[in-house]
Image (cartoon, grey):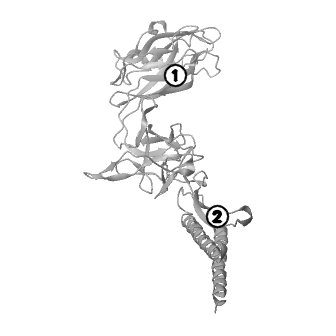
Amino acid sequence: MGIYGALSSAVTGLRAQAHSLENISGNIANSQTTGYKRIETDFLDLIPDAPVSRQVPGAVLAQSRSTNDVQGDIKTVTNETFVALNGNGFFVVEPTVGQSDGQPVFAGTNFYTRRGDFEIDKAGRLVNGAGYYLKGLDVDPGTGNVSGSVPKIIEISNAFLEARPTTTINYGANLPQLPKTANYKPTEPGSELLRVDLQGRDIMGEHEDEFINSSIYGGATTIYAENGAPADLQFRWAKADGDTWNLYYLTKSEAADDQAAWKWVDQDFSFGSNGVMENPTTDTTNLNTVNINGVAIANVSLSHGAQGLSQFADVNGAVSVSTLSQNGYGAGEFVAVAIDDSGRVVASYSNGERIDVAQVVTAQFNAVNKLKRLDGGIFSGTSESGEAILDISGSGIIGAALEASNTDISDEFTKLIVTQQAYAASTRIVSTADEMLQESLSMVR
């Protein structure tokens, strides 16, 4: 190669170190950029063809190497729509391509990012700081199951949540073997029992006081009509004989003498000597049309299961309620949205309900470092990276968190020093080659 070859190699060295410096400067500049993946520099030696005994190192070529598979630190934040990924994968996002009638237009193209600083915009869409919109799959609010298979822009409606009428009441309790009612007297056997003429029928207003004194409180909950109207459901248990009970609920708070105050559920509950329920043999008891102080709620099922009710001895003589819940709610106003650790986008309402509205979709690639980088911490798939492998399991998603840049400032400064010295050394080669050329030229004078 000679002097000109050495000069040419030195120039490629200068060019390679300049490329490395450019990568280092970009990494340092983005050390605080959310989800940023640093770029390393690899050097490739170029060996000119020659016999083994005449081979020389030759020139150098600088290449960029991605670190998309290297995770940055995860930090917690207070914003509940911010989200991070612990492990491999990317959020699926999409940019706008324009506007029509004041609304953003999307092209339906998937891009990928680790930047999870998503916030809700005026239209209810989740967009990150780089202007890319989060994509996912709808969730059926009734079943909680994901519907569909093609990710789309997640949109959260700020409309009122429609009321849901109560259809099922889950109830579990232990009834004492000896109920200590107001009428109970230890010296009078049977004083804890409900009068025979009141058993198995609705309790009218004229007998309400006697009923209250002969029964025990069985718990209370709020249930809802179809229009969202609430009604306070109160249960009372009255023992009819040794092992049989009647269940009642309050139907009218201020009933006249000839009006029903407490409604019998039209079902006897009996228990064996071991305290296990023998009747009914079904898991549910229908309450038919429930009407509480004028609020009508149809088709209510009391779900107690085969072992949800029992009759074990209790020194307090009171009902011990273990389960009392229902599936209805009143209408609610949209309050906020959050992304939980399973990747579910959850809308909160003023009635206390939290409804899953979407499932965040993530994507993985076989050759993750072959993705093409774009502005804003965005990547696009390439023929070398392979097709995206979509995941709806929510694995690795952390709500109220962000992934920091994977740039290590101290490491970048160390590489900066090495690059500066290598660049300076290459300039010395150019100077030396120039001096040698000058000496060669002076020989002919």
Q: Residues within 10 Å of mark 2 (few under 14, many from 20)?
A: few
Q: Position of residue 108 (x, y in %)?
A: 37, 45
Please determine whether, in this image, residue 439 is positioned above or below residue 107.
below
Camera-side residue of 269 and 140: 140
Q: Earlier in the sequence, mark 2 or mark 1?
A: 2
Camera-side residue of 112 and 134: 112
Identity of the amino acid at label 1? Tyr
**Quadrant showing the N terminus:** bottom right
Residue found at the very far right of the displayed protein: 53
Please determine whether, in this image, residue 255 is positioned above or below residue 151.
above
In the picture, measured across the screen, residue 209 lies left or right of residue 3, that is left
Q: Secondary structure at mark 1?
A: strand
Camera-side residue of 55 and 153: 55
Camera-side mark, 2 or 1: 2
Residue 285, can we see it? Answer: yes
Q: CA distance from mark 2 to mark 1?
A: 84 Å
Question: For mark 2, what is the residue?
Answer: 48
**Quadrant showing the C terminus:** bottom right
Question: For mark 1, what is the residue?
Answer: 171
Residue 138, can we see it? Answer: no
